[in-house]
Image (cartoon, helix red, strand yellow):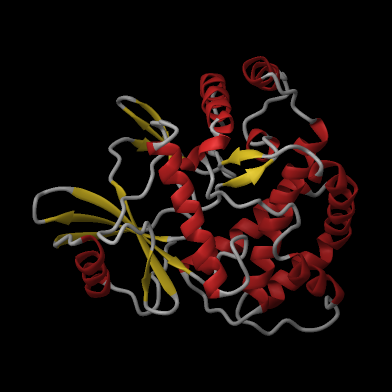
Amino acid sequence: MRDRPAGVGERELKQALADGWHTRVVATRYAPVGGGSYHWVVRDDRGRQWFATVDDLDDKCWLGDTRAAVSRGLRAAMETAFALRHRAGLWFVVAPVRAVDGETVLPLGSKYSVTVFPFVHGASGRFGAELSAGDREHLVEMLAALHRSTPAAAQASRCQIAVPRRGVLETALRELEQPWRGGPFSELARALITRKARHIRHLLASFDELAERVSALEPVVTHGEPHNANLIRTRNGVMMIDWDTVGLAPPERDLWMIVSDSGQETCRYAQVTGRPVDPAALALYRIRWTLDDISAFVKMFRTGHRRTADTEHTWLGLNNTLARTAS
C-alpha cells in the first residue's frame, strides 16, 4: 500500500507494540509494499528488526462482512500460520509472533488491527513476474507439503468459492447507463467497464458453470496467493509470506498460479501427493481471481475516492486486468 492508514502513524504503532509485545521501538520505516495491508519495518532497543503489519478491518471482505467478523477471520488465519510453522514444522511459513497475552493479532483502535512478524532477510519477488521452471518445481514441493499439513490447521476456515464482491460488480454492470460519481476515476472506470461488459458477463457465466463441481472437491489447507510477490528468497531457501488468505479449499486454489502449459507441475503434484489435479478447478480459480480483482477495482471507483498513489495504481490494475483477459 502506497498510502498510509488514516489515523495510524509512528506514535500509534510504537504504543501498540509497547503495550502488546512489550517491545520498545526506536526506529520505524514505512514499507509501501503489498496490496492489502500496511507495513512497517521496525527496530527495537535491543537492535532486533521486526515487520509490523496493520490491517484495515473494513477492507478484507474474504474474511467477513463486519469488522468483528474480519477480526475473527484474521485471528483464525494467523493462528493457522502459527500452527503450520510451529506444529507442522513448515519452516518456509513466515508466521506471526505472539503478543504477551498469547494473541497473534491485537486491535489498533476500532478500525484496524496489528500483527508482528520476524523480519526476513532476503529478496522478495515482484508481483506479476514470471516464475522460472526451477521456482515452479520448488513451489510444487512446498505446496504439496502445505496441503499435507491440513491436520495441523485446526483453526483454518473454509474458503468460500463465491466471488466476495460479486454483488458490487453485478450492480455496476446494471448501472452502466448512469453516471458514477465516486471520484476522479469513476467515469473513466464506467467507460472501460462498458466496453468490456460482455466479456465480464461471460466470465461470470463460466464461473457459475464450474462452481458446483469444484465445491464438491475435498479441501486441504491452502495459502491462496502463492505468487512471486509472496515469496522471499533467503540464504536458506524460499519462504512464503502473507498468510491472511490461508484457508481450506481444493488444492487448485494454490496450484493454478504455478502451473505451466507443459503440465509438468500438475504431474509432479499428483506424483508427490497421490491426488490428481482437476482442470475444472484450475479454470475456476483462474476466473475467480480475475473477477475478484475487477470487483475490488470497481468498488473503489464507485465509492468516494481521491487521486492518490493507490488509486492511480488501482486504475492501472483495472486496465491491465481487462487487457490480459478480454479478447
In this picture, residue 276 sits left or right of residue 254: right
Q: Is residue 125 positioned above or below 242 on the image?
A: above
In this picture, residue 198 sits left or right of residue 50: right
Q: Quadrant of residue 59?
A: bottom right
Q: Where is residue 256 shown, x and y percent of the image?
A: 68, 35
Q: Is residue 269 positioned above or below 125 on the image?
A: above
Q: Which quadrant of the rendered structure holds the N terminus?
A: bottom left
Furthest-left residue in view? Answer: 46
In this picture, residue 18 sits left or right of residue 147: left
Q: Where is residue 255 shown, x and y percent of the image?
A: 65, 33
Please tell me which residue is depicted at 50% across the width and 70% down the height of the picture: 57
Q: How many marks?
A: 0
Q: Nearer the viewer, residue 57 or 107?
A: 107
Please tell me which residue is depicted at 61% across the width and 64% down the height of the picture: 315
Q: Nearer the viewer, residue 190 or 133?
A: 133
Q: Quadrant of residue 235?
A: top left
Q: Where is residue 172 shown, x and y percent of the image?
A: 79, 73
Please tell me which residue is depicted at 70% across the width and 17% down the height of the picture: 267
Q: Is residue 202 positioned above or below 125 on the image?
A: below
Asked if residue 242 can be seen in this view, the reply is: yes
Q: Where is residue 181 shown, x and y percent of the image?
A: 68, 85
Q: Is residue 112 positioned above or below 278 on the image?
A: below
Asked if residue 124 can be seen in this view, the reply is: no
